[in-house]
Amino acid sequence: MRPEEMQRWVDDYLEEMDEEQRARERAGLAGIPLPNTKPAHLEMLMDQAGRLWVRDFAPDWEEGTWRVFDPDGRGTSSLTLSVGLRVVDAIEDRVLVVGAEALRVETVRVYGLLR
């Protein structure tokens, strides 16, 4: 991971903290070495149909792609979400997504999946 990418992760992480907490966290993070590689995947979830949803690694400021695999491990589809949206659950042919609107108010959206 490039130093500027890591710095952006840290800045995003610290953004909502007060100054005292931010100083403590920054001091703790300073002692952690930068990783040499990025993980391939960021999150996984299993839906009610036994499909595995795998989110490719991407920072929060980039679009996120989820890949869907059937119970036999075959890729069936993928879904790319805009920045700021995150999958919280997948049910049958729908996916529940949370996103922050104006003033950081979170809303839940339900999207139908194409077959």
Image (cartoon, rainbow, N blue to C red):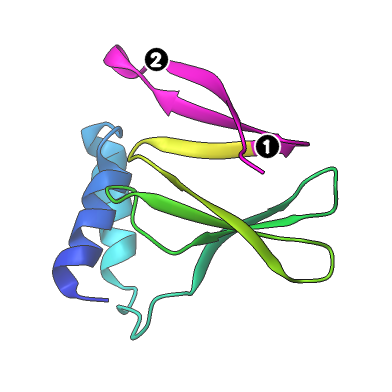
For discs 1 and 2, the disc positioned in front in the rendered view? 1
- Counting other residues with Cα less than 10 Å from the Cα at mark 2, is it few (<14), some (14-19), or many (20 or more)? few
Please name the residue shown 30% across and 34% down the image.
17
Q: Which mark is residue 16?
A: none
Q: Is residue 112 above or below residue 57?
A: above
Which residue is nearer to you in this view: 77 or 110? Answer: 77
Q: Quadrant of the C terminus?
A: top right
Residue 82 inside the magenta-drawn segment: no
Q: Quadrant of the N terminus?
A: bottom left
- For label 1, the residue is 89
**Image check: 75 left or right of 48?**
left
Which picture quadrant has residue 78? bottom right
> Which amino acid lies under the numbered mark 2 shown in the image of this protein?
Val
**Which percent across, then down, holds residue 99?**
43, 27
Magenta segment: 89-115
- For label 2, the residue is 105
**Image check: 67 left or right of 37?**
right
Which picture quadrant has residue 12? top left
- Counting other residues with Cα less than 10 Å from the Cα at mark 1, is it few (<14), some (14-19), or many (20 or more)? some
**Label 1 to label 2: alpha-carbon separation:** 19 Å
**Image check: 57 left or right of 92?**
left
Secondary structure of the residue carrying tag 2 is loop
Q: Is residue 96 above or below residue 51?
A: above
